[in-house]
Amino acid sequence: MTRGKVILNSDRLNFTLRRLCYQLIENYDDFSDTCIIGIQEKGALFADRIVSILQDEMGLKVDYGKLDISFYRDDYRRRENPIRPSETTIDFLVEDKRVILIDDVLYTGRTIQAAMSALQHFGRPAEVELLVLVDRRFNRHLPIRADYKGITVDAIDEAYVRVEWKPEHSRDQIKFYSKKVNS
Amino acid sequence: MPESSLSTKHLLGIKYITKEDIDLIFDTADSFIDVINRPIKKVPSLRDVTIANLFFENSTRTKMSFELAEKRLSADVVNFSASSSSVKKGETLLDTVNNILAMKVDMVVMRHPVPGAPMFLSKKINANVINAGDGTHEHPTQGLLDSYSIRRKLGEVAGKKVVIIGDVKHSRVALSNIFCLQKLGAEVKVCGPATLIPKHIESLGVGVEYDIDKALRWCDVANVLRIQLERQDIKYIPSLREYNLYYGIDKKRLDRLDREITIMHPGPINRGVELNSDVADSEHSIILQQVENGVAVRMAVLYLLAGRKN
């Protein structure tokens, strides 16, 4: 099995998370009329961290939901098996709200496209911005870009970027693999 | 992203699927319950899939439930009913279906009066086949939605005591229920007049109880079946009034129990025969929840079968 290379270690990842939170505060102030939506499953793990810093460390109150996009993906019936859906937990309407959509890795852009289709079912947001931890710059299939990003990675198609979080993994870190491995 | 698939290409009966399949269908249905309770109840998953609903036997609610499930998944739907088709002109089942498949249909939902008809079809055609009831054999999506309704109401199916009451002999719902409940670890009894209980049903591992009051005292859930007057070419019961007297469930009967039980019915109810209105409309009854769960379960079955690489 290929051993991944750590491209962002735990300490640096911690700084990046806080930097992203400050960038959000710059733009959203007290987060009134704003909500954060994490894309299930891995985007929601990242969003959990962002929301936890905003609420627990910075004392802000944020509407937070998790969005499952399995039924909105455009690769259904192109995969070997259907994706097992996760839970959607959005107990508020996004109507006229400013939405911060969060995912861990921005790659082809298809996940974000599916998320925006799914989001329409919860109302018409005033605006939507995208926050990602990793932006894989050269692999986009669609005209989608991130408004806030943790790090930018230039990688060929075969490569794989994996974000690991505690407690599922031994430490918080981002790893780069030259070939895809089973997570 | 975790991916999971059913072990089968078709849903012909509960007998032919595994416990893992049932759990996967139920977990997926949980997500669809969420979808159908949103302001916009539609998802685009099956937007490039065409489904033919072939109903060679009358159906209102099953057909409607399937059609709604298909439309909420954005599938294209064509409907066929035997009463207004070439079947009346002598066309065979296979010819009818091949004609429909030549129009590039991906999935077939079929109800047919002959037991085994969906099985026959699945061996001859390439599309996914879903059995929506074949004679007195199976009605798998009803079996699934009944067990799913128990899971939603009581938390889990394993260890629960379920009695199926009434016309078990003519009921495909009963057989699918028995298989589904047993695979999920429930204990099952059937109850009804001896004429409506099939011989040797004990060989399926179910208990038989002829006294309804004893059956109700034993169970956590009573699934009450409809007396199928249309399938009774000979008299199995002296009169509907007598059936109601001995096997009808009314509030008085439930008040005599020392605990609350859940009442289910696959519909349509013969009020005043197998169920009285004071029970059918009471808080014990989850009949309308069964209908809602039916759409979600059928969406899950369609989603999982259509997404499977054949």
Image: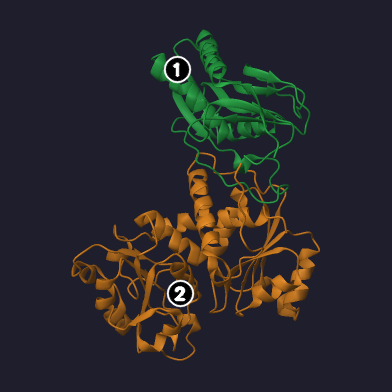
Chain colours: A green, B orange
Name the spot of residue A114 as percent of width and height, x first.
64, 35
For the residues labelled 2 and 1, the Cα–Cα distance comes to 54 Å
Q: Is residue A62 above or below residue A92?
A: above
Q: Is residue B219 above or below residue A113?
A: below
Provide the residue designation for mark 1. A54
Of tags 2 and 1, the one toward the viewer is 1
Q: Residue at x 62, y 18 (%)?
A: A149
Amino acid marked by disc 2: Ala
Visible residue check, residue B267: no
Q: Residue at x 45, y 73 (%)?
A: B178
Q: Please tell me in which quadrant of the rendered image residue A43 appears.
A: top right
Most extreme residue toward the bottom, as rendered?
B234
Mark 1 secondary-structure assignment = helix
Name the spot of residue B61 as percent of width and height, x first.
52, 63
Q: Residue at x 55, y 57 (%)?
A: B298
Of B92 and B209, the residue lying toward us: B209
Quadrant of the snapshot with the C terminus of chain B: bottom right
Task: Report whether A164 appears left or right of B270.
Answer: right
Provide the residue designation for mark 2. B174
